[in-house]
Amino acid sequence: MNDVLTTTLKVVRMNTLADSLVFCSYKGTSYRTFHSAFTLAGCKAGLDNFTFHDLRHTFASRLVMAGVDFPTVQELMDHKDITLTRRCTHLSSAHKQCAVRMFERVGDNVPAMFTTDRARDAAMLQTHLLFQSWAASSTGRATDS
């Protein structure tokens, strides 16, 4: 657990009696299964077809987009194979666009080996297309999804 979750649970516990439930139904009784509590919370939040497993994908995706390396995410997800970790991560369009923008900033520093603007532009376009192809293959989807 991180500090935010620990603090939140402590606040919830402070606002309840020591022997009362932390998570309970509107009747004050315990949930029979976590699934029913999660489904009800999802419905109240307006999330259709959202499963608890989707949270794992969100967790992995956000870690990767925050710059956490795949082996660390693999361990946190308890995956035996890093291929599964890569399949579970879904990079947002904004994250991919940011990566491309970082690459475009390099364009001003193209090596002097290109003697003409046309040669430089052709090399940049080729590199950009290769990068897009790599980005699409690493996520298993088209780059605009």
Image: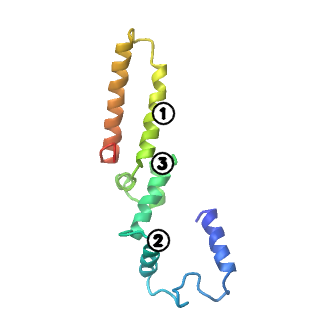
Q: Please indicate, yes or no, whether residue 74 appears anywhere in the rendered image.
A: no
Which residue ends up furthest to the top in the rendered image?
115
Residue 45, numbered label: 2
- The residue that mark 3 highlights is 65
Do the residues under discs 1 and 2 have CB atoms within 8 angstroms? no
Q: Please indicate, yes or no, whether residue 56 appears anywhere in the rendered image.
A: yes
Query: Which of these two is toward me, 78 or 54?
Result: 54
- The residue that mark 1 highlights is 102
Figure check: 131 above or below 38:
above
Measured as percent of width and height from the top left, residue 98 is found at 47, 39
Give the class, few, some or many, for how many residues have Cα within 10 Å of label 2's Cα (few <14, many ≥20): few
Residue 77, numbered label: none
Question: In terms of secondary structure, where does tag 2 sit?
Answer: loop
Give the class, few, some or many, for how many residues have Cα within 10 Å of label 1's Cα (few <14, many ≥20): few
Q: Nearer the viewer, mark 3 or mark 2?
A: 2
Which of the 4 image quarters holds residue 50?
bottom left
In the image, what residue occupies the spot 66% across and 84% down?
16
